[in-house]
Amino acid sequence: MYSQMLCGLCQHKEVLRVGAVFASGFIRAIKFLEKHWRFLCNDIRTGTIDSQITDQSVREAVMKILKPDPQLADFIEAECSKDSWQGIITRLWPNTKYVDVIVTGTMSQYIPTLDYYTNGLPLVCTMYASSECYFGVNLNPLCKPSEVSYTLIPTMAYFEFLPVQRNNGANSSISVPKTLNEKEQQELVDLVDVKLGQEYELVVTTYSGLYRYRVGDVLRVAGFKNNAPQFNFICRKNVVLCIDSDKTDEVELQNAVKNAVNHFLPFDATLAEYTSYADTTTIPGHYVLYWELSLNGTTPIPPSVFEDCCLTIEESLNSVYRQGRVCDKSIGPLEIKIVEQGTFDKLMDYAISLGASINQYKTPRCVKFAPIVELLNSRAVSSFFSPKCPKWFPGHKQWINMN
């Protein structure tokens, strides 16, 4: 990261695009620059590489680009030392035309942050792929992020589709096996037979040997390019949180969090990152959200605002959850834990130490692995609970009681 950032700054007028695979990764790079720009400026001013970069082949490669440039170092220092980092990308790399980054699905939460740092440069999602294989491309790359659709290329793999029914925004199963049972194999739909507006789980057979492999992505048919179907990415096919009969998937959770963070607007604060955990050690069990905040203002956020956030999330969840809170009492009040800045970087470091790819790492929207939960809890600085039950109307039960 350091060496790549150093080369990018040395050639700052030649850079035409910036980005990473996922929006979260690109924002991590900006935060890295925010933390290390003084060291980078020193290297550019002196034409040397920081001693912390120990890989000899990397040092030799960088030295082919790096030359002493005090004027450039002064320019970078002047920009990075300003109070506001708004538009820092276009200030440091003035010829940048767009940001090449995935902002579909839950990555959409990063769009306001990207707009802040890039002065509203176009956010371009060029392709749809995974570690298993490439799937398709975005034929209209300059469209709005909310309108991104991918046209699957039929020569990339053999694509089949399993129809998905999501109730109240949640999928019907908690975990998704990688293989199909006999009934599911009979339900599979070919690429040419998908229906407009229908949601499907993507199943692939690849040249490398995967047979009818469940990728785990839920797609919706958005339209057609000639006869080729185009798909919106909806979510991963998994239930993020479940305590009782409730099922909350990542799309529903993302929308609920999005509603809640509006309470931070008067305080010039934003949600930098979050994840969740279904805590069943309490009776009854309850949802726990871990939030890392980015505080730009000077006015402290009172506890009542965080409590309002808890309640707003609960109000935004499906009726089955709210019934469990209000009527059945099978779910306890939702809890938000505020964690120290840098906590989610520590989480990424831990995942990478276990073998995760830094290039494809995404913050998990739900955690279950005990060491990760322990890490998050150890860095929590405050905790807030929903002050009351969310609104829930019994509907059918009301008519029974009236009779």
Image (tube, rainbow, N blue to C red):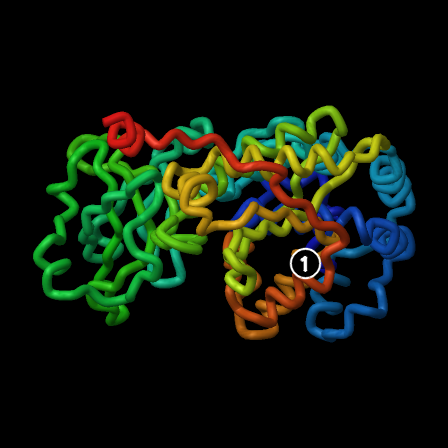
Direction from residue 240 to residue 191 in the image, left or right: left
- How many discs appear? 1
> Relative to 124, is 201 on the left or the right?
left
Residue 368's x, y, as percent? 51, 64
In this view, the residue farthest toward the front is 403
Where residue 7 appears, as percent x and y from the top left, is 72, 53
**At label 1, which amino acid type do we have?**
Asp
Name the quadrant containing residue 121. Answer: top right
Nearest the eye: 180 or 3: 180
> SS for tag 1?
helix
The one of 23 and 255 positioned closer to us in this rendering: 255
Query: Residue 261 sits in which quadrant?
Result: top right
**Residue of label 1:** 345
**The one of 329 and 66 positioned closer to us in this rendering:** 329
Residue at 35% x, 32% y: name it.
394
The answer to whether residue 254 is above or below residue 97 is: below
| x 66%, y 37%: residue | 307
Check the image and report above or below for 356 versus 294: below
Q: Residues within 10 Å of mark 1 (few under 14, many from 20)?
A: few
Q: Is residue 43 above or below residue 75?
A: below
- Assign the C terminus to one quadrant of the image: top left
